[in-house]
Image (cartoon, grey):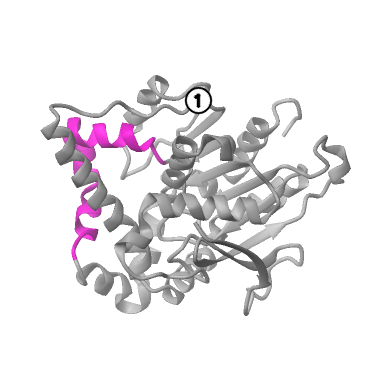
Amino acid sequence: MTTDKHHDRAANPRSGDPPNWHHETVHVNDVALHYVTLPPARDAVDHPTGAAPLVVLLHGFPECWYTWHRQLDAVAAAGYRVVAPDLRGYNHSSTPPGLDSYRMEELVADVRGLVESRGATQAAVVGHDWGGLVAWECAVREPELVSQLAVLNAPHPDVYRRSLLRSPGQLVRSSYVGFFQLPWLPEQLLEADDYRLVERALEQLSAAGSLSESDRERFRKAMERTDSSGPLNHYRAIGRDTVVDGITSMLRGGLPPQRRVDLPTLLVWGERDPVLDSGLVDRHHAVVEPLSVRRFAESGHWPHAAQPGRTTDELLAFLDPSSPA
């Protein structure tokens, strides 16, 4: 991993964002990552390390850093340094070519580079959807990097893989992942009619009314700004690795053991998720310890959009159980 801890003010930051939302770019792991960061509202001297704890917020598909806009101020107000990046291949971050650039080891290395660029050795890592998958892999592959893990509607990757083999229903729900493996055609459909598919997907997957028209337009603009092969290559890279791992496992006569996560973990689950079976949740107790689960009965795939206040309260209570949210 190559890390150049060089920060720049991002070009053309979004006008109208609050002045404490700082758009910056850091060069790590051979890519430029755009992120939005907020300073903690409370004095860092309150913290025994002399620096406020770092919280990294990872977005999903088809989104960008802005998916966390309802949580940014509250987390900073609670005394944390907040960093919400665009993942590689999205929005203002670099879109490197080739599937190897989107393998999970590269995405985990991006998070490590981002954390280290902020002068930290650890961070609380929060992720939703694809960002949740990256967060899980950070905890599995580099547990020393993660002080606490919070994941919204994204299963542990090994739990998910086993579910695909054992649950025809989940396999059907995940059929879009197979479609994304095709060359060329997914890009064409994603880009058609000025990326209107992005708006329709967000509207269908989130609870009714949880994303405003301006929210959906902002995500559409971010995807329009993106080379659409970048987000799709995330799926293609993990699809290729999953097939290779599956064939290897069958040749060896069985599934590999599930990788454990032994650090404080919060799993938030919107139970009206059309792409992920809520039955996945209970299977995490075998591989994650200690685990706290919060089920949002009225939320879909985006609990932080459908119930932003409750999501923020749960996150803050988890990050610092000694302080009221």
Q: Is residue 316 left or right of residue 258?
A: right
> Seen in the image, is 262 located left or right of residue 147?
left
Q: Residue at x 38, y 50 (%)?
A: 104
Tell me which secondary structure the magenta stretch mostly adopts: helix
Front residue (pair 186, 237): 237
Quadrant placement of the C terminus:
top right
Asked if residue 299 shows in the view, the reply is no
Q: Would you identify the image quadrant in which residue 228 lies?
A: bottom left
Q: Quadrant of residue 226?
A: bottom left
Tell me: 260 left or right of 147: left
- Give the magenta part as a residue range: 154-182
**What residue is at 64 percent from the left and 45 percent from the top?**
55
Q: Position of residue 54 (x, y in %)?
A: 68, 45
Above or below residue 165? Residue 8 is: below
Q: Amino acid at mark 1?
A: Asp
Read off the residue under disc 1. 262
Is 27 one of the magenta-colored residues?
A: no
Residue 160 location (% of width, % of height): 30, 36
- Front in this rendered view, residue 89 or 257: 257
- Viewer-proximal residue among 195 and 59: 59
